[in-house]
Image (spheres, rainbow, N blue to C red):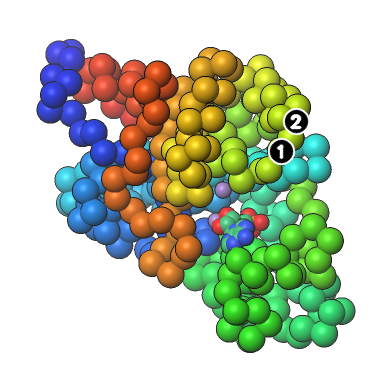
Amino acid sequence: MIPLPVMNLPRVYDLHTHSHYSDGQLPPAELVVRAAANGVEVLSLTDHDVTDGLPEARRAAETAGLTLIPGVEISVTWGHQTVHVVGLRIDASNPALQGGLQRLRDFRVWRAEEIGRRLDKAGIEGATAAARALAPRGLVSRTHFAQFLVAAGHAPDLRRVFKKFLVHGKPGHVPGQWAGLDEAVGWIRGAGGQAVLAHPARYHLTATRLRKLLGEFRECGGDGLEVVCGSHSRDDAYRFAQLANTYDLLASAGSDYHGPQNHYMDLGPLPPLPDGCTPVWQAWETETVSESPHA
Ligand code: AMP
Ligand code: MN
Ligand code: MN
Ligand code: MN
């Protein structure tokens, strides 16, 4: 059990990405090839509420020579807010984790029908069938509804279609009934993984609510905060780096890449973590080879 020499370790991390197993555009193998070509050395595939893309990603990563971190992004309902918790280095074969994810996917099936019923009342027919047809591996996301609505001419782009139809108070909105924060963190940690609160700036919480969320997340065993991500500005990164330290959370970095046509940033080197953060991967780098994560 000889520790790996630090200088030879991979250093370009992207710990938040999606494939067509959830609402990304690319198959896992193509995602991995693109990440490697763009200089990513350690990649996590973190599909929404599903881990079925991991075996394909792992095989492609072996060929491409990059390290694949098995991941997932779990949908959580916290109060009336949906938040996302990324699980890193999970053992995807863990039964409690898989049972939890199955429950969320079952809710998605019902929700897709309900979104369709609501859009139908608003005069837009056939949305559920169209969204399903756009979901190649069966997990239907609001992203697939948004793609259909844009293609049908209801708004010019995804951002505007979300705003017009798919968010709170709009015709196609269905309130979430996702995992509890403690459940999601418990599933991830029970599967040997680390729980990271994803893209915190995206929730637009007041300072008080944000403190409450971070406090509860830490209390139920959360490990890290996504400090650098595709939807964070540099100011966001500095702000959340400070909060990570205040709440004794590790700092993570991920693009939240969804595919070539998405408005989020491309795969590839992200801006560095602000000074003073403890990267979520710091402990990984000093581990011995025999302690490498589950594939
Ligand atoms: P769902 O988990 O099915 O409710 O869908 C949420 C997904 O929709 C997120 O993971 C994003 O990929 C996407 N999304 C949410 N808001 C927007 C937006 N304003 N513009 C584009 N995509 C969005
Ligand atoms: Mn998504
Ligand atoms: Mn997310
Ligand atoms: Mn994501």
Q: Nearer the viewer, residue 103 or 26?
A: 26
The x and y percentages for residue 39 are: 21, 48
Q: At x 34% / y 29%, what residue is drawn?
A: 293
Q: Is residue 239 left or right of residue 100?
A: left
Q: Residue furthest front?
A: 235
Tell me whether circle 2 and circle 1 mark residues in contact (CB < 8 Å).
yes
Q: Which secondary structure, mark 2?
A: helix
- Assess disc 1: are there few (<14), some (14-19) or many (≥20) residues with their C-alpha within 10 Å of its C-alpha: some
Q: Nearer the viewer, residue 135 or 5?
A: 5
Q: Which secondary structure, mark 1?
A: loop
Question: Does 40 sit above or below residue 182?
Answer: below
The x and y percentages for residue 95 are: 55, 36
- Assess disc 2: are there few (<14), some (14-19) or many (≥20) residues with their C-alpha within 10 Å of its C-alpha: few
Q: At x 21% / y 34%, what residue is drawn?
A: 10
Q: Is residue 136 left or right of residue 280?
A: right
Question: Does 149 sit above or below residue 28?
Answer: below
| Residue named by callout 2 | 209
| Residue named by callout 1 | 205
The x and y percentages for residue 121 are: 87, 79
> Which quadrant holds residue 85?
top right
Q: Is residue 62 left or right of residue 90?
A: left
Q: Nearer the viewer, residue 70 or 280?
A: 280
The x and y percentages for residue 273 are: 38, 31
Question: Does 71 sit above or below residue 278?
Answer: below
Q: Is residue 21 visible?
A: no
Q: Amino acid at mark 1?
A: Leu
